Image (cartoon, rainbow, N blue to C red):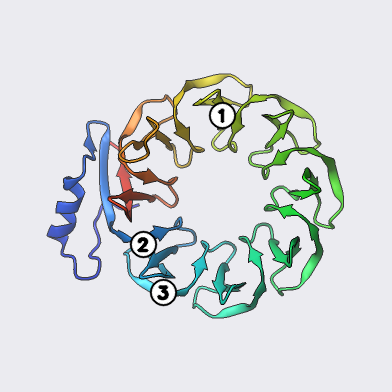
Amino acid sequence: MKNIMYKIGNLSLAMLIFFTFSIPSIYSQGQVQLFISPQFDDVGDFMEGLAPVLKNGKWGFINTKGMFVINPQFVKAYPFMEGLAAIEINNKWGYINKNGKIVIDAQFDAATDFSEGFAAAKKGNKWGYIQKDGKFSIQPIFDHASSFKLGLAPVAQHNTWGFIDVLGRFSIGKQFEAAKSFHEGLAAIQKGGNWGYIDTNGNMIIPTKYSAAGSFSEGIAPVRVKDKWGFINRKDDFIIQPKFDGAVSFYEGMAAIRIGKQIKGNVGYIDETGSYVIQPTYDWAESFSAGMAAVQIKKKWGYIGYIAP
């Protein structure tokens, strides 16, 4: 991301500079800049150059300058993935392209992002997988379903999770209490009430000993021990000791963390040494994506960028 500030709507550059410095965001390590001022009621990540945002009760999509390129008109919207975004209209879900044109009719009771050419979609009370023609290539027979990664997707039947391949066959049998998609070759799974990690062959790589676990990213995963979060590597060694009250995976060298039980004003970002890059000053914050991260300030959402020293 370039070290610039954009004009957003009627906001002048001087006003943006005011917003940037009116929040506690400048530190010796680097500089935080508020690229899009807090003005939205809810937001999603920037993906493929656009982000879904909620304004005045409807969702639309903005570009990195904060300008609407698809006007607010949807009940709900998810980020673009593989050129399509899931949107909700009249209690049904479909998909639009980047021109805002509906390319898969709103016909599903729920839907997720496309990943590896497939999207989980719900008909009635069962989930299956569609491709970009909008037709089910894996019939809706599952109680729950998540995204395909590395050719495998976690699905549940009768509250037991396993992993299917792109033909809908179980590659890793149903045996888990919960499961997440694969990231960097490992998937977080729950067994016996605790979380660990398996590989794509179903081998247990990290034992189920954590009270909660997130996905691996940049070689690191957030895990919870009792009520504190830390970060482990693929060898199951703690590289950042459990000391946070909330944490998500690392992206672009930073992870959002929370300090304290109260959310308001307690969310910031750390680097892979556990040092603060952006102090905990936000009410809520999402992961960095394409150089920007969504943050909540006084009940409104905007987007920041970080300029390294």
Three-letter residue code for mark 2: Thr
Three-letter residue code for mark 1: Val
For label 3, the residue is 72
Q: Are marks 3 and 1 in contact (CB under 8 Å)?
A: no
| x then y, percent, for residue 70 | 43, 75
> Which image quarter: residue 176?
top right
Q: Is residue 196 above or below residue 100?
A: above
Q: Is residue 304 above or below residue 175?
A: below
| x then y, percent, for residue 183 | 64, 41
What whole-number distance in Å separates the C-alpha atoms at marks 2 and 1? 32 Å
Q: Is residue 301 above or below residue 133?
A: above
Q: Considering depth in this image, is 167 or 281 the residue closer to the camera?
A: 281
Name the mark on residue 223: 1
| x then y, percent, for residue 6 | 25, 61
Q: Is residue 245 above or below residue 297?
A: above
Q: Residues within 10 Å of mark 3 (few under 14, many from 20)?
A: many
Name the mark on residue 64: 2
Please identify the quadrant where the C terminus is shown.
top left
Identity of the residue drawn at 21% across and 39% down: 24
Nearer the observer, disc 2 or disc 1?
1
Three-letter residue code for mark 3: Pro
Q: Secondary structure at mark 1?
A: strand
Identity of the residue drawn at 24% across and 40% down: 25
Nearer the observer, disc 2 or disc 3?
3
> Which image quarter: residue 96?
bottom right
In the rendered structure, the answer to whether residue 15 lies left or right of residue 308 reads left
In the rendered structure, the answer to whether residue 227 lies left or right of residue 269 reads right
